[in-house]
Amino acid sequence: MVEILFVSLGAILGANTRFKIYKKLEKLTISKDFLILIINTFASFCFGLFIPLLERFSSLIDSYQIILFFSIGFLGSLSTFSSFVYDLFDLCLRLKFVRALKLFIISSSLGIIAFALGFLLGNQ
């Protein structure tokens, strides 16, 4: 039951953080696809940064509960796979296959690159 509490608390904070970031970026009149791309890339970077830092400080903290709270709860809610998939599905329904493919490739590539950069930065 404690595990569910850690994930839930992280998810509440992550979803609210995502909402706040989305609302701030929305004022810049950026397209919805790009907003989601920015937030998911940021979350990927944070996750990449988190893993080496967790390993570095694992002797000082109870890492399992931190993993539940931060990576599964907070970052899982900050980055949302469902919004990404919905946008791809919506583009396909509107027969915009090339745009859907570009969104898929760019989102996946940037997510991996951001994760790698965070991981490398965290290992320094």
Image (cartoon, rainbow, N blue to C red):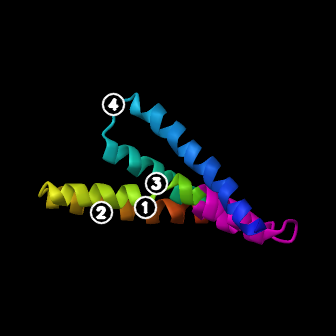
Q: Position of residue 25 (x, y in %)?
A: 44, 34
- Which corner quadrant holds the C terminus? bottom right
Identify the residue at the far top of this view.
27
Q: Which residue is mark 4?
A: 29
Question: Where residue 95 appears, x then y in whole percent?
Answer: 11, 58
**Mark 1 or 3, closer to the camera:** 1
Real-space Cα separation, disc 1 to disc 4, in angstroms:
22 Å
| Mark 2 lies on residue | 104
In the picture of the structure, the residue carrying the numbered disc 3 is 40
Mark nearer the N terminus (2 vs 4): 4
Residue flagged by tag 4: what amino acid is it?
Answer: Thr
- Per the picture, the main secondary structure of the magenta-coloured stretch is helix
- Judged left or right of residue 101, residue 8 is right
Q: Most extreme residue toward the left, as rendered? A: 95
Of label 2 and label 3, which has the lower sequence position?
A: 3
The image quarter in which residue 111 lies? bottom left
Tell me if I can see residue 32 in this picture.
yes
Q: Residues within 10 Å of mark 2 (few under 14, many from 20)?
A: some
Callout 1 touching callout 2 (CB < 8 Å): no
Q: Earlier in the sequence, mark 4 or mark 3?
A: 4
Q: Which disc is residue 58 wearing? A: none
Q: Residue furthest right?
A: 60
The tag earlier along the polypeptide, 1 or 3, is 3
Rendered view: 43 above or below 54:
above
Indicate the amino acid at tag 2.
Phe
- Kindly identify the amino acid type of the residue bearing the numbered disc 1: Phe
Q: Are marks 1 and 3 in contact (CB under 8 Å)?
A: no
Q: Which amino acid type corresponds to the residue marked 3 in the rendered image?
A: Asn
Tell which tag, 1 or 2, sits nearer the viewer. 1
Alpha-carbon span between mark 2 and mark 4: 22 Å
